[in-house]
Amino acid sequence: MTSRGFDLAVVGAGIVGLAHAWAAARLGKRVVVIERDARANGASIRNFGFVTVTGQQQGQVWNRARRSRDLWVAAAGSAGIPIEQRGLTLTVRTPEAQAVIEAFLATPMGEGCEWLSAGKLKQRFPTPTPPSTRGALFSPHEVRVESRTALPALKTWLENRLGVVFMTSTAVLEVSPPTIRTSRGVVEAAAAVVCPGDDLVSLFPDEIAAQSVTRCRLSMLRLADPGFRLPSAMMSDLGLVRYLGYAELPEVATLRRVLEATHADCLLHGVHLIVTQSADGSLVVGDSHHYGDTPAPFAPQVAEDLILQEFRAATGLAPPPVTERWTGTYSSAAGPMFAVTPTPNVRLVMVTSGAGASTAFAIAEDVIGDLYQTFLGDIGL
């Protein structure tokens, strides 16, 4: 079987692939998305659905996160995807963490954000905090969707509203436009964007290896409804040494030394705290980070214990019962992402920092704009 007449084939239907399909469809291109699974099942749904702006690395990543946030809001409105939460509250318990936040607020990235003392935090957001809480950084810039339902909704919207064709349960064997060879026959497309997620070997393995890509495995939990509503997504001190928008500030060195003394196990297992809340009141809580070419599928109990320990420390509450557990893997490298041209009319795109949901829409605008020599910021949504 041969499928003909496509301008662009996108390999992979995770958030990076869907972002590129949307960008190309906005240009009026005839797009086919080819996905090996029956539905999105990887890192794009095994996460918080948290589109993070504040804390992203200064410069291009932060700019892309802001643009992607705007595109998420536009897509969500058109596709009927609920925005479950808005904003970020990053609570801190040490003077060293407060100093990092004060330094952050003095940078351009702190625009629109504010420091809330412990008293102001309780007045504005009457949710539990322990007596040790010194205050919080509040950012209004974030949005949060439910990943496991948002990805299918994006797919349906792209199909029904923009005419994107999807071929699922189909493996791509070779990408050589105008021929895309798959397990279900040949697809003819003038160009291709390959978005392989954490598959490092099936397509263009030499190009991926040249970027020194490995994998990161994370552990996450869903907790039962705690009986209150969070005003926004929540983070704690540990996030300040992980997110580069904070972690690259000079003031972080002192905080890191403190955490090495008080939270050595958390740093060893890459644990920091993010808490988001779903429409049914349940909490999505995580996460940990373990790295390797093929990370073992066995999630250590100690990582879960450390996540729940930090939840208790940041909220002052015993964690509600765990209702779900899962692991996810994503591609990881020294840089936040890369887009290379392995052959003419082909782009290989990987987000290698765990920020796919936060940056993919803007990355896709850049890649598709380069492919078709067009600035997508001028193209209507």
Image: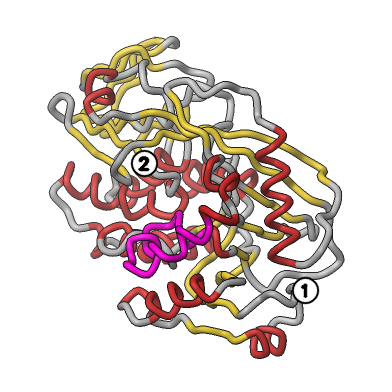
Q: Residue at x 66, y 59 (%)?
A: 276
**Visible residue check, residue 153:** no
Of tags 1 and 2, the one toward the viewer is: 1
From the image, tell me which residue sits under label 2.
351
User: Within 10 Å of the Cα at label 2, are there few (<14), some (14-19), or many (20+) other Cα atoms?
Assistant: many
Instruction: Identify the image quadrant of the C terminus.
Output: bottom left
Quadrant of the image occupied by residue 17: top left
**Numbered range of the magenta stretch:** 239-259
Residue 98 in the image: above or below residue 60: below
For this rendering, which residue is in front, 370 or 317?
317
Image: 313 above or below 216: below
Residue 64 at x, y percent in the picture: 32, 59
For the residues marked 1 and 2, what is the alpha-carbon distance in whole angstroms? Answer: 35 Å
**Residue 238, quarter of the rendered image:** bottom right
Residue at the front extreme? 261
Which mark is first along the chain, 2 or 1? 1
Q: Bin the neighbour count of mark 1 within 10 Å (Cα to Cα): few under 14, some 14-19, many 20 and up.
A: few
Residue 325 quadrant: top right
Badges 1 and 2: C-beta atoms under 8 Å apart?
no
Secondary-structure class at tag 1: loop
Q: Considering the image in quadrants, where does the N terminus appear? A: top left
Give the left or right position of residue 253, taking residue 72 as reference: left
Provide the major secondary structure of the magenta segment.
Answer: helix
Circle 1 residue: 128
Question: Where does the image place residue 307, in percent across and percent down from the top left?
Answer: 67, 49
Q: Give x and y (percent) for residue 269.
A: 56, 40
Q: Please name the residue shown 24% across and 38% down the image.
A: 339
Secondary structure beneath dot 2 equals strand
Q: Vertically, is 242 above or below 95?
A: above
